[in-house]
Amino acid sequence: METHSSEWSRSSFCGNSACVEIALCGEDVLVRDSKNPGQPHLSFSRGDWNNFLDQVATGQCF
């Protein structure tokens, strides 16, 4: 699954340090390492991604 670099975004909290970047691609959320953008990415359904974000926001995910 190819995506253009303009589709990738990162958190405003990232600054200049190493971060993860995400891209929305159809029904999936793609996640990659900002230090190695040419390497393979992870793919999650939007439902799974939203569950992950909810768990992080409530301190359930460590």
Image (spheres, rainbow, N blue to C red):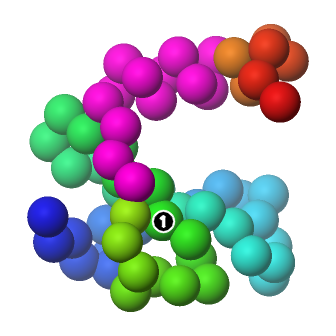
Is 25 left, or right, of 18 in this rendering? left
Tell me which amino acid carries mark 1.
Arg
Residue positioned 53% across, 16% down in the render: 51
Residue positioned 25% across, 39% down in the render: 28
Is 23 left, or right, of 54 in this rendering? left
The picture quadrant where one finds residue 1 is: bottom left
Residue range in magenta is 42-54
In the picture shown, does residue 8 fall above or below 26?
below
Residue positioned 80% across, 82% down in the render: 16
- For the stretch drawn in magenta, what is the main secondary structure? helix
Is residue 48 a member of the stretch shown in magenta?
A: yes
The picture quadrant where one finds residue 53 is: top right
**Dot 1: what SS?**
strand
Is residue 33 a member of the stretch shown in magenta?
A: no
- The residue that mark 1 highlights is 32
Residue positioned 31% across, 67% down in the render: 7
Is 51 left, or right, of 58 in this rendering? left
Q: Residues within 10 Å of mark 1 (few under 14, many from 20)?
A: many
